[in-house]
Amino acid sequence: MNGKEIVEKSRKRMLPIYGPSPLAFARGKGMYLYDTDGKGYLDFSAQFSSCSLGHCNEELNEAVSAQLRKLVSVTTMFLTEEQTRLADRLLRAAPKGLSRAIFGCTGSDANELALKLAKYGKGGGRIISFRRGFHGSTAASAAATGKAETIQEDSGISELLPRGFVHSSPPYCYRCDFGGSEGACGNWCLRYLEQTILHEGGDKVAAVILEPIFAAGGVIVPPKGFLKGVRELCDKYGAFLILDEVVTGIGQTGTMFACEEEGVTPDILVTGKALTGGYIPGSAVLVTEEIGRAAEGLLLHGHTHSCYPLMCAAAEANLAIIERDGLVKNAKDTGAYLHRKLEGLRDRYACVGDVRGRGLLQGIELVRDRETKEADHDLGERLFQQMLKNGLITELESRRNLENAVIVLHPPLITGREDVDRAVSIMEISLEKCLRGE
């Protein structure tokens, strides 16, 4: 089928839940996706941060192919060498103190298990998360999400959300909830978190869950010391710390896991997306020995495809390539170069209010006025579409109730400086057209 036929057939046969762009891709290679007409698109989304090695990496393809010929479908009723090897490799790469692993299918189901483990381990209690955070689309993961998605906004389906979840104020320095200014942080969000624990936690808080960098909330990078402060509060009040590294993990921010930047080890770490290079759905939950022992009686979670050897083989090969080729360091170095180039856009265009990020996870916030910081949602949508038209795939986080409009970039770990130069050039050309009203 050609592109037009695919779009027409999709509109007739597919549920329009995701609201996809009328653009059909036929193949991919490296940093690029190609549509049915052969046009190339530089992928600075890595398909929601999952394709860590880019598209159609031959070595990863071969690892998946070899496993397909060997063994694919084994449920969690049994053990395989593949899951044991992956657990060992992943735990060796994880922050010290995490010693047990279990695998899943998506970030949502992994966060679901993390929340169950916390509740089970503490004998119940509240879960505290943060506004603007995103943790998934299933019941508990959606309840932990503070980004006000449809399930929170629509009263007809919001009753599906479980009780016992409380949202605290996010560490969003550019739009501080307490009126603070950047560079003069009073740690008000940490103080508010402690108040939330004391006043909203009832007699017990089971866990605090957050992303080390709030990706879907608009690449919100907490101020230095925030993550350590959360760790200290969890220890003070006997709560588990869950770090959702579904987006930030597997090297995206310049360290294998973003929490390493501040030397913080959570009680539970969740990762996914780039774990398998995006080639096979997969996720993981890593926990301390204490939680691992306590979970022996937990028979409340599982999926048919969890721990499949095909996923494990893809993840192990992906991690081996990342380590061998020094791609975590590349994410740090190339990400710093990308950040500087984006700062150049901010210096030249008043509509760019802020540039923030770490490694190859970066965001630019668009505003109507730098003084008032009023979000420019219309410009965000037009710029996103114009960049796509010009051959650059990004993501747009722009919702009226969040009061921000952010272009999000999280390209593959293989990104080079020439890719950054091309991407930023397309961004500037597209921005110029939008500002001229074209």
Image: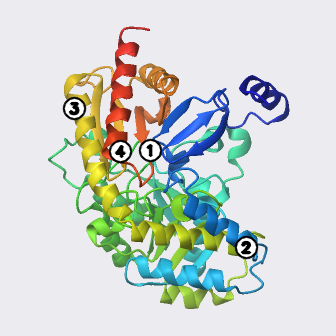
Assess whether mark 3 and mark 1 are in contact (beta carbons under 8 angstroms). no
Assess whether mark 4 and mark 1 are in contact (beta carbons under 8 angstroms). no
Q: Describe the element under mark 3 as helix, strand or loop.
A: helix
Q: Nearer the viewer, mark 2 or mark 3?
A: 3
Label 2, label 3: how far apart the Cα atoms are: 48 Å
Q: Nearer the viewer, mark 1 or mark 3?
A: 3
- Residue denoted by label 1: 217
User: Which numbered disc flags the more N-terminal residue, 2 or 1?
Assistant: 1
Label 1, label 3: how far apart the Cα atoms are: 23 Å
Label 4, label 3: how far apart the Cα atoms are: 14 Å
| Front residue of 305 and 376 | 305
Question: Percent position (x, y) of residue 339?
Answer: 27, 43
Q: Give left or right: position of 165 versus 334.
A: right
User: Which numbered disc flags the more N-terminal residue, 1 or 4?
Assistant: 1
Circle number at residue 302: 2
Residue 162 visible, this orientation: no
Residue 41 visible, this orientation: yes
| Front residue of 131 and 28 | 28
Assess whether mark 3 and mark 4 are in contact (beta carbons under 8 angstroms). no
- Residue denoted by label 3: 344
Which three-letter amino acid code belongs to the residue tagged 2? Gly
Which image quadrant is residue 174 in? Answer: top left
Q: Describe the element under mark 2 as helix, strand or loop.
A: loop
Quadrant (top left/top right/bottom left/bottom right) for the N terminus? top right
Label 2, label 1: how far apart the Cα atoms are: 29 Å
Which three-letter amino acid code belongs to the residue tagged 4? Gln
Question: Percent position (x, y) of residue 131?
Answer: 45, 48
Q: Nearer the viewer, mark 2 or mark 4?
A: 4
Q: Nearer the viewer, mark 1 or mark 4?
A: 4
User: Which numbered disc flags the more N-terminal residue, 2 or 4?
Assistant: 2
Q: Give left or right: position of 275 versus 217.
A: right
